[in-house]
Image (cartoon, rainbow, N blue to C red):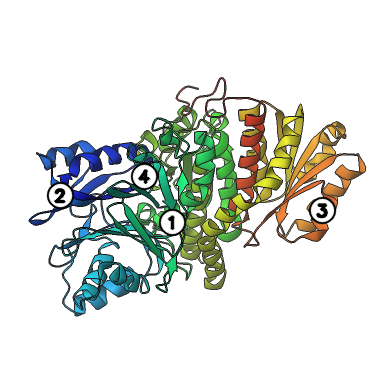
Amino acid sequence: MCGIYGLVKRGEGDCSGPVLEALRRLEYRGYDSAGIAVLTGNGMTVRKRGGRLARLAGALGRPLVGTAAIGHTRWATHGAPTDRNAHPHRDCDGKLAVVHNGIVENFRALRERLQRDGHRFASETDTEVIAHLIERERSRGVPLAEAVRRTLRHIRGTYALAVVDAGSPGELVAARNSSPLIVGVAEGAAYVASDAAALLVHTRRVVYLQDGQIARLTPGNLRVMRGDGSAVRHRSDELPWSADEASKGGWPHFMAKEIYEEADAVRSACAGRLSPSGAVKLGGLESVLPRLERTERVTLTACGTAYHAALIGAYLMQEYAGADARAELASELRYRRWARQDTSALFAVSQSGETADTLGALEHARAHGHLTCGIVNVVGSSIARMTDAGVYTHSGPEIGVASTKAFTGQVAALLLATLMLGRARGALSAGRARDIARALSRAPAQMDTLFARRRSVERAARTLARADHALFLGRWLSYPVALEGALKLKEVSYVHAEGYGAGEMKHGPIALVDRNMPVVVVAPRDRVYEKTLSNIQEVKARGGRVIAVGTAGDRHLQGLADAFIGIPRTHEAVAPLLATVPLHWMAYRAGVLRGKDVDKPRNLAKSVTVE
């Protein structure tokens, strides 16, 4: 995750101070480098540094006076977090600067073409091609906003970007596609940011840019157009939050914000790593890939929510990588007898990278000669340092104690690892890998659409909020999703909830089913769909009330259920990502309806560093 901020104002004044303050408000998103570009009376001044904002502030010295500026905090994807790879990125003449969130999927082909045309590149990033493409249009006498519009026709991928040009000192151009960007307008000034947290100190009047829109900002004014150049009649909204609340991104709770960011967590996990052909590049695993190819057994270990992600990962590796894979609770695994072998691998899954039980299991694995890999979110954490190799999920900081977007980031990272391993071991055909990759690429946009279904989720949440107990059921890949849904509900609403494999329901839990016991069933159209329908019939025969999460348009399932929440059709390997979002939102809303502090559930800590 990373942050964008920009401003343009009437007359000259201090620009570096407001940009630095805005970037500090965006620090919670996580970053590893930062930079600023200011249009001054002498042209453009750019300062950027790898590391924390303090390094950038130290490099600025005195305040930079100008008419417009852009700033950025970056979480590295293409290229290491160095000074030269930090944003903003410039054109050949240093007159134009760009900051960008997202991924330019076709940047290699664009870069090669630009280099053949004589453009000189100064970084390893995908973003720099945008600056040179705009430069090409500007050299033809095209106005800045039009140059950006023409440039974006060549870009494949996601972006939120802001552009300033010394040749147009009184304007700033911004554009969005699948990455958030908000414009703020005030008397004599205009602003753009990736999060409202950076805008509230200046204005509460904002315009939310939509995908495919391009905005031209001048002091106190805003013009928005579509990708075809036609004008958009934009609507401004009044932000209802205080600056102190803005660190939640305008959401009433961090948990709500982080559920909303689950799609971004998947985007970030896949950014720069996934090809539509099914090829996966995980730099953190490449050095140990030969050992992984020979591995006879893969153990995935974790605690809590991360264990549910590990369980999905084990199923995926069994099915698509041909691995003898299994998931184990770290708190149990660390005390079990270990056999010494160098043909086994252990994946330690943790958001914080500091979970005590997971670290304990990891230490035992290392002592017994196992290859160790980490799936973690926090860069430089203990698990990241202790393992032989690993994958960062890049989900950004997760502040809510009940993990949400970290879970989806972990599942996405494990699916990427499965694709990489399956192809390397020859267990996964190119065609199957391509099908999964395409579905995974579409998943974030599909996840975003789920918030339009909040009304049906709200009805289900009200049912759960009134209950004392709830049962969550699922089969195969939906079984860990059911476990996750049950855990979230009891964490934040304190409703007693249990997750079970749907086939196990008749081996005990069915005794609890009656009209007062809601049963949530995860039943997308996958290979076990018909079996799950039979389990739903068993619940209905006992008078149970069924809340079903299934594939949108499934009239048969909708007819069986008392409440139905549809998710977009997708590949069965990707379905857990989509099915999880409504379960998380359902739990969140049930907790709010019961008056609980959903961000800080009682007795729980964000990072469990004790046994």
- Look at label 1 and name its amino acid: Leu
- Look at label 4 and name its amino acid: Asp
Residue 209's tag is: 1
**Would you name the residue on which mark 2 appears?**
66
The earlier-in-sequence mark between 2 and 1 is 2
Quarter where residue 558 is shown = bottom right
The earlier-in-sequence mark between 1 and 4 is 1
Q: Residues within 10 Å of mark 1 (few under 14, many from 20)?
A: many
**Would you name the residue on which mark 3 appears?**
533
168 or 327, which is in the foreground? 168
Label 1 vs label 4: CA separation?
A: 43 Å
Residue 471's tag is: none
Q: Residue furthest top?
A: 603
Q: Residues within 10 Å of mark 3 (few under 14, many from 20)?
A: some
Q: Nearer the viewer, mark 4 or mark 3?
A: 3
Element class at badge 4? loop
**Would you name the residue on which mark 4 appears?**
388
Element class at badge 2? strand
Which x, y percent locates residue 295? 48, 53
The earlier-in-sequence mark between 3 and 1 is 1
